[in-house]
Image: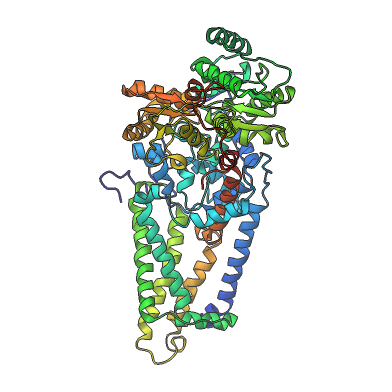
């Protein structure tokens, strides 16, 4: 059945198949294979709830998910088919936990998953999946493959089979409170410097505050202008706000690497800080996965509903523009917007940035596949922290780069520092003469001081209602 | 016991029992697994509506994926609808169901039956060719895919043999050609026996899976 351009069909295998993924993996710790496997299986059994089981029973092997994946589309390699990235986990489910597991085991219809297979699949689960969820949109069965990849990462982390660079930043975040060395002391020094340099008030460790501002370490270390922009906006809206050195780091490498204990520890720092200062709102920075970690998974970490609202900065901007509390000037240029997957498609806040762009008087030139169906930049899910994935990531990035170019927009914006970092890195690699800007910083640069009579605000009731639904 | 007698009696009862018990067990085995309550503040509480929306909206692909998935989608509709018309619209099948349940309905016109048979055959063979030639589909396919295809096409083949014989037979087929009728019935029973164990169970799981995603995503206000 092999033909030109087709991988060889291996008829010696128990099933019709092509070549296994390239062996390319890292290991943490000194443990026997049996111990690694036992740890993976135990984690797997613990995680495998009703919805995941439902998805495992539902796949019809149609392959549509491949047509949504930027890693498959940019390489044409079938091993990047999203559902294939879960193959050993599907086998483990059927053999150990599925409805007919006893038959699979007794008759050995599905051989037990081996450590060698988990090692092989490490590349597929970590290097070639940003958990962007575009494949979920293409699945006729509605299977949330991205969510299942998150569960697969739990098992691989338990087995000590994580790309080492991703593991190292996650471990550092767990130990120091920040993956990039933005410790409480570094943050405090940096905020003092920024406050002096920009002659702006930045409140730190206030005993009480309505809004607790948080940042991503990428902003703290690479884009400090975002910290200033956040302070400017909060001072402008007149909210009682503060930064807390007890909980400020919104990135969550525990979640991305697959360590639930580290994920919980990071999240609890934010929750504890918010409770301590009686915050009504925890304001999340321009960071995609931070939104998933606190907005949608934070309550599960706490074990009860969060006693405060969680807003991404784009939602906060939209709400306050709609209420008239935040007044911005019109820019009058054309703009392209890159949707961070975790905030738009998977987070449900697709409309908020568009509302802000409209308020700024920008003519939005959408890319092909914009909004909920936008392509990922290629660096999400910890992929950009994993240097061995660079070549693959650049291929995926090319799709986005060409789509942005095709808009012909004068400026390019996003609301995720990780995406921004991926664009910066991609632009340097491809000598692309475009820069990805921050929506937050653009708003901060175009604030209208009180008394400036240029904007017809406050907005109408309809817009307030729309903003409340972001 | 004659083969036809077996196929119309114990064989049919057994295969139907396996179908019902097997599917029920498979669904129960999924729903007995623990489910974590989502404690996050919902963006929307219209989760039932979200489930319904997902079930309906995934009947067709997003426009973005049209170029890559249109042919496959149309083909799938072709053979699914074709199979449904053949099963529910052909006179002997209606008589068979009436004997079992007492229920009956009008048959489809002959031209529609012939067209449905054509769509089902062509569609199923196209699906098999796609699975064997597409690198993606070859990679992700396993025994279940080929077994499910086989047990689906077999009743079509054995049934078409009967249609051919019926052209020359002035009497009910079961009296003139008991063995071919029995073989056709047994091929259907093979399909019923396999259905709960393989991917043909998507006749049930398609609604459960889409519904679960639709409800969860509606809660977040996320895209469906």
The spot of residue A123 in percent (x, y) is 45, 32
Q: Name the residue nearer the viewer: B195 or A306.
A: A306
**Is residue A385 depicted above or below A304 in this figure?**
above
Q: From the viewer's perspective, is A310 left or right of A413?
A: right
Residue A246: % across, % down: 68, 18
Q: How is the image coloured?
A: rainbow
* Residue A77, image quadrant: top left
Above or below residue A181? Residue A51 is: below
On the picture, is A159 further left or further right than A302? Answer: left
In this view, the residue in front, A53 or B165, is: A53
Q: Nearer the viewer, residue A108 or B166?
A: B166
Q: Is residue A14 above or below residue B12?
A: above
User: Can I make out residue A279 in this image?
Assistant: yes
Outermost residue, left side = A4
Q: Which x, y percent locates residue A467?
A: 57, 38
Q: Quadrant of residue A421?
A: top left
Q: Residue at x 56, y 19 (%)?
A: A232
Q: Total marks drawn?
A: 0
The quarter of the picture where the C terminus of chain A appears is: top right
Residue A53: percent from left, percent from top: 59, 48
Residue, far bottom? B170
The residue closer to the viewer here, A154 or B89, is: B89
Q: Is residue A350 visible?
A: no
């Amino acid at each position: 059945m092999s033909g030109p351009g087709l991988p060889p069909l291996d008829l010696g295998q128990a099933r019709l198949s092509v070549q296994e993924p390239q062996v390319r993996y890292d290991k943490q710790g000194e443990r026997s294979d049996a111990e690694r496997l036992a740890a993976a299986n135990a984690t797997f059994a613990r995680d495998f709830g009703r919805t995941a089981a439902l998805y495992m029973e539902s796949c019809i092997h149609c392959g549509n998910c491949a047509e949504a994946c930027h890693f498959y589309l940019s390489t044409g390699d079938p091993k990047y088919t999203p559902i294939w990235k879960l193959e050993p986990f599907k086998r483990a489910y059927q053999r150990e936990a599925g409805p007919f597991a006893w038959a699979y085991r007794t008759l050995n219809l599905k051989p037990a998953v081996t450590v060698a297979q988990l090692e092989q699949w490490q590349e597929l689960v970590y290097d070639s999946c940003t958990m962007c969820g575009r494949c979920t949109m293409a699945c006729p069965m509605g299977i949330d493959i991205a969510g299942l990849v998150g569960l697969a990462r739990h098992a691989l982390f338990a087995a000590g089979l994580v790309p080492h660079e991703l593991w190292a930043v996650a471990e550092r975040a767990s130990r120091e409170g920040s993956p990039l060395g933005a410790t409480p002391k570094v943050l405090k020094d940096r905020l003092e410097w920024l406050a002096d340099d920009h002659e702006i008030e930045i409140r730190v460790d206030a005993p009480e505050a309505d809004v607790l501002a948080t940042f991503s370490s990428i902003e703290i270390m690479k884009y400090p202008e975002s910290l200033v922009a956040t302070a400017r906006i909060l001072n402008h809206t007149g909210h009682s706000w503060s930064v807390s050195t007890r909980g400020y780091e919104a990135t969550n490498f525990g979640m991305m690497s697959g360590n639930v204990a580290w994920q919980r520890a990071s999240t609890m720092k934010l929750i504890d800080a918010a409770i301590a200062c009686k915050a009504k709102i925890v304001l999340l920075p321009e960071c995609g996965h931070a939104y998933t970690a606190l907005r949608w998974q934070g309550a599960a970490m706490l074990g009860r509903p969060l006693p405060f609202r969680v807003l991404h900065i784009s939602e906060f901007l939209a709400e306050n523009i709609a209420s008239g509390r935040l007044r911005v000037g019109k820019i009058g240029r054309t703009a392209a917007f890159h949707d961070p997957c975790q905030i738009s498609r998977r987070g449900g806040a697709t409309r908020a940035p568009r509302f802000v762009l409209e308020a700024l008087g920008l003519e939005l030139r959408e890319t092909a596949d914009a909004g909920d169906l936008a392509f990922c930049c290629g660096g999400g899910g910890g992929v950009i922290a994993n240097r061995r994935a660079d070549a693959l990531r650049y291929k995926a990035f090319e799709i986005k780069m060409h789509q942005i170019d095709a808009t012909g927009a004068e400026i390019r914006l996003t609301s995720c520092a990780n995406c921004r970092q991926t664009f910066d890195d991609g632009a340097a690699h491809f000598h692309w003469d475009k820069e990805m800007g921050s929506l937050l910083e653009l708003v901060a640069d175009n604030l209208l001081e009180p008394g400036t009579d240029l904007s017809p605000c406050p907005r109408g009731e309809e817009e307030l209602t729309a903003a409340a639904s972001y | 016991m004659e083969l036809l007698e077996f196929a119309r009696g114990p064989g049919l009862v057994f295969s139907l029992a396996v179908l019902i018990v097997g599917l029920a067990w498979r669904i129960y085995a999924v729903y007995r697994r623990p489910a974590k309550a989502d404690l996050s503040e919902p963006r929307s509480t219209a989760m039932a509506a979200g489930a319904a929306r997902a079930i309906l909206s995934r009947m067709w692909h997003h426009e973005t994926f049209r170029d890559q998935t249109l042919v496959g989608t149309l083909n799938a509709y072709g053979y699914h609808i074709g199979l449904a018309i053949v099963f529910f619209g052909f006179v002997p099948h209606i008589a068979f169901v009436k004997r079992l349940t007492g229920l009956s309905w009008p048959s489809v016109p002959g031209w529609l039956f012939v067209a449905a048979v054509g769509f089902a055959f062509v569609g199923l063979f196209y699906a098999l060719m796609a699975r064997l030639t597409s690198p993606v589909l070859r990679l992700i396919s396993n025994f279940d895919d080929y077994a499910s295809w086989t047990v689906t096409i077999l009743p079509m083949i054995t049934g078409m043999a009967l249609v051919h014989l019926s052209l020359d037979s002035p009497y009910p087929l079961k009296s003139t050609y008991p063995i071919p009728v029995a073989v056709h019935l047994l091929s259907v029973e093979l399909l019923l026996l396999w259905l709960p164990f393989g991917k043909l169970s998507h006749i049930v799981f398609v609604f459960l899976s889409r519904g679960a995603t639709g409800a969860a995503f509606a809660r977040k206000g996320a895209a469906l």
